[in-house]
Amino acid sequence: MSKGKIALFTEDMYNDLEFWVPYYRLIEEGYEVVVVGTGRQAVFNSKFGVPVKADLTSDQVNAGEFAAVIIPGGYAPDKMRIDQGMLRIVRELHSSGRVVAAICHAGWVLVSAGIIKGKKATACAMIKDDLVNAGAEFIDQAVVVDGNLITSRVPDDLPDFCREIIKKLG
């Protein structure tokens, strides 16, 4: 029996580790992980060419059915941040107090969703200015938790990132 549904975003050029580590870790914990794509295509390839098939497109998602959304990094967030369905999911989960987790370049999605202002957050160094300019307080540490928002920097931070997601899910 599933503990609940977790939306895991994907698009081309997603970071392999930042997608697959949370994917399997949350399944291990008993959650149903639903892969959500932009709808641009059915199968998306990682930075290293590993394909993943989306279970749903962002416009098919009823955010009310999900306990959390996880946004992996890589270069995929540059495409995710212009998908209105993905931004809607992030906004709805955030405003309802459910977990929104982003790692590395995924902070771009938080900026575009308009939920980062006044929040403590971290990300890879390359997008620090984007977060700060959007009103976030940037903290350079492995994982930053601010309410229901969980952020991390890079793949090396995945153990801390996954641990905080699982802890916050209860």
Image: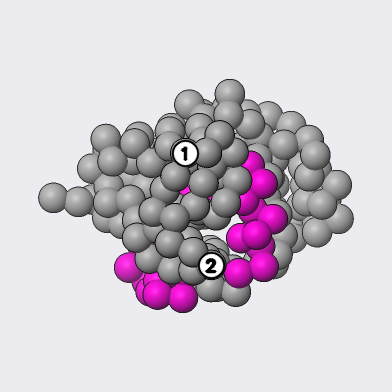
Identify the colour scheme used. Answer: one colour
| Residue type at tag 2 | Arg
Q: Quadrant of residue 86?
A: bottom right
Rendering coords of residue 123 (x, y %): 69, 40
| Residue type at tag 1 | Val
- Residues rendered magenta in the picture: 58-83
Q: Which residue is mark 2?
A: 40
Say left or right for 45 vs 153. left
Residue at left 49%, top 64%?
41
Rendering coords of residue 12 (x, y %): 57, 51
Q: CA distance from mark 2 to mark 1?
A: 17 Å
In terms of sequence position, does the residue under pointer 2 or pointer 1 come before the other?
2
Q: Secondary structure at mark 2?
A: loop
Rendering coords of residue 30 (x, y %): 23, 43
Number of residue marks:
2
Residue 70 shown in magenta? yes
Question: What label does residue 114 carry, if any?
Answer: none
The quarter in which the C terminus is drawn is top left
Rendering coords of residue 75 (x, y %): 67, 46
Q: Which residue is mark 1?
A: 50
